[in-house]
Image (spheres, rainbow, N blue to C red):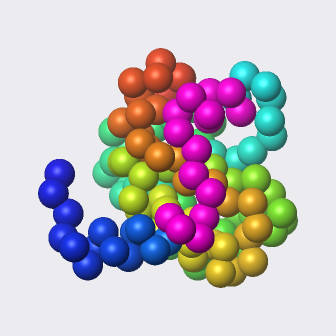
Amino acid sequence: MSHNPGFLALVNAAKSRIREVNIDQYREMVSSGDPHLLIDVREESEWSAGHAAGAIHLGKGIIERDIESKVPEKDAKLVLYCGGGFRSALAGDALRQMGYGNVISLDGGWRAYQASGLPVAK
């Protein structure tokens, strides 16, 4: 997918302020039992078509509104994913600004997750 330059500039700025992990690093988190909450920030239709097993859904359009009710602990480790890693970076940056200090964006997002063989759900 080709993205507009303004969007890419916004994403790159967000990525400079947050932590990212690739799918291999995420697999290591899972296999080592590193406690975290996996959050899918995609649209409802994307979530309904399939998502990471054990994830919760807080779409990018509502995550800032609902995160404090769902995850009141500001030090919780949150791993966010979207389709490829752009929306999750933007959402992660917003959560960082809200005081969440341990937010991670999954680079490669859902596409990388699916290709990894990790469990999925519908």
The front one of 34 and 42 is 34
* Residue 113 at x, y percent in the picture: 46, 32
Outermost residue on the top side: it is 117
Could one spot residue 82 in this view of the protein? Answer: no
Q: Residue at x 80, y 40 (%)?
A: 35
- Residue 38 drawn in magenta: no
Could one spot residue 52 in this view of the protein? Answer: yes
Which of the 4 image quadrants contains residue 11? bottom left
Outermost residue on the front side: it is 16
Quadrant including the C terminus: top left
Q: Residue at x 41, y 28 (%)?
A: 114
The front one of 24 and 110 is 24
Q: Residue at x 80, y 36 (%)?
A: 34
Which of the 4 image quadrants contains residue 66? bottom right
Q: Is residue 26 above or below residue 65?
A: above
Q: So how many labels did they put on this image?
A: 0
* Residue 16 at x, y percent in the picture: 53, 68
Q: Is residue 52 left or right of residue 30?
A: left
Q: Is residue 63 above or below residue 38?
A: below
Q: Is residue 53 above or below residue 73?
A: above
- Residue 17 drawn in magenta: yes
The front one of 9 and 105 is 9
User: Which segment is the magenta one?
Assistant: 15-29
Q: Is residue 6 above or below residue 72?
A: below
Q: Residue at x 29, y 73 (%)?
A: 7
* Residue 8 at x, y percent in the picture: 30, 69
* Residue 109 at x, y percent in the picture: 43, 44
